């Protein structure tokens, strides 16, 4: 059935104004600039995220000493030669702290992107096309979230093998239920809106309506959640490496560095664990602040 062109144009205008891909809107940019101007905490978070992202790209090139080759001195305290000291293997802690974001941030970015895409697809399809598969998918997400996530991550990594690809996959699967629920909640609130009914009356297929009209209008909460998910992914990656189930030495990784120096703290060799611990804490804090700021902007616009 064809729809009146005047009605179609009005519906199209409504869909455009309701479009939740707010990253392209002038209002989003204005709110973001206002948040940067008024919130010193958000500014700190932005600097920390930018710094960690920059180090993920150029960190290894800033190393003052070889990353995986021992120096002539082990357990050397911080000095003019070794700014953050050296660990028990004689590796320069400062150089490795700078290089570690290439692993940690890269894993977090890949895992977050994968979970965002997968969770959005599952959430969209199971909420727009209701049925037994949708209920099965939701019960599966309930089961995943009922387990202690870190314990589940350990089990899956140990069973599948300790390599970067498996770590990324595990972290992504742990975060997927978050996006499934976010998208599902949004889809249920817009699936009967006027512009969806108009697209259906205009002859669009249900699959086309779901991806062309519904999905772009429900993505903003998930995009705002992404920085928080990245911070959690960094923590999980570091935690897996800390217990020996993640990135293996001598690859520079914050969790592995903390584990390597944990025993030295009781005898005064604090620098091996403290500096990578500070780095991971500040990075996760930065992503959390950015995520909360973006969520505040999204809630203001909805």
Image (spheres, rainbow, N blue to C red):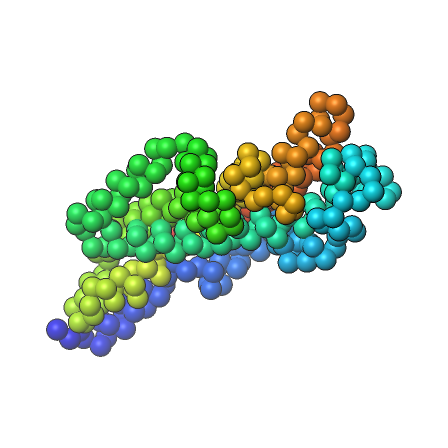
Front in this rendered view, residue 33 or 123: 123
* Residue 147 visible within the image: yes
Question: Is residue 271 found left or right of 179 in the rendered image?
Answer: right
- Quarter occupied by the N terminus: bottom left
Residue situated furthest right in the rendering: 80
Asked which quadrant contains residue 270, the reply is top right
**Residue found 26% across the figure and 61% down from its top:** 210
Question: Is residue 181 found left or right of 80 in the rendered image?
Answer: left
**Residue found 58% across the figure and 48% down from its top:** 104
Residue 188, relative to residue 195: is it above or below?
Answer: above
Q: Residue 49's x, y, as percent? A: 61, 50
Q: Residue 162's x, y, as percent? A: 50, 44
Asked which quadrant contains residue 151, the reply is top left
Residue 23, relative to residue 44: is it above or below?
Answer: below
Q: Residue 70's x, y, as percent? A: 76, 44
Residue 192, relative to residue 3: is it above or below?
Answer: above
Front in this rendered view, residue 242 or 134: 242
* Residue 224 visible within the image: no
Residue situated furthest left in the rendering: 1
Asked which quadrant contains residue 125, the reply is bottom left
**Residue found 31% across the figure and 41% down from its top:** 141
Q: Residue 238's x, y, as percent? A: 56, 40
Question: Is residue 231 found left or right of 272 in the rendered image?
Answer: left
Residue situated furthest top in the rendering: 266
Front in this rendered view, residue 131 or 17: 131
**How many discs appear?**
0
**Residue found 68% across the figure and 58% down from its top:** 58
């Amino acid at each position: 059935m064809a729809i009146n062109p005047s009605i179609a144009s009005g519906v199209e205008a409504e869909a455009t104004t309701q479009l939740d891909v707010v990253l392209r809107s002038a209002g989003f940019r204005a709110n973001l600039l206002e948040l940067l101007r008024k919130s010193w905490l958000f500014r700190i978070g932005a600097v920390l995220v930018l710094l960690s992202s920059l180090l993920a790209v150029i960190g290894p090139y800033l190393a003052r000493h070889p990353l995986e080759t021992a120096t002539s001195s082990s357990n050397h305290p911080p000095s003019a030669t070794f700014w953050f000291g050296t660990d028990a293997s004689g590796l320069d802690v400062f150089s490795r702290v700078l290089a570690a974001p290439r692993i940690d941030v890269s894993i977090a970015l890949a895992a977050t992107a994968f979970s965002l895409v997968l969770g959005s697809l599952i959430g969209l399809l199971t909420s727009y096309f209701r049925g037994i598969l949708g209920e099965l998918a939701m019960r599966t997400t309930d089961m995943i979230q009922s387990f202690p996530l870190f314990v589940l991550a350990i089990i899956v990594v140990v069973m599948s093998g300790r390599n970067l690809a498996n770590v990324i996959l595990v972290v992504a699967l742990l975060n997927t239920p978050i996006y499934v629920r976010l998208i599902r909640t949004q889809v249920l609130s817009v699936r009967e809106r006027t512009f969806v009914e108009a697209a259906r009356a205009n002859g669009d297929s249900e699959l086309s309506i779901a991806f062309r009209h519904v999905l772009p209008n429900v993505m903003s909460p998930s995009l705002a959640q992404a920085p928080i998910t990245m911070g959690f992914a960094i923590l999980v990656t570091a935690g897996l490496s800390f217990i020996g189930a993640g990135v293996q030495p001598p690859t520079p990784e914050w969790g592995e560095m903390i584990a390597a120096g944990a025993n030295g703290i009781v005898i005064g060799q604090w620098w091996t664990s403290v500096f990578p611990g500070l780095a991971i804490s500040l990075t996760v804090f930065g992503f959390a602040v950015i995520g909360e700021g973006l969520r505040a902007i999204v809630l203001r616009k909805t």
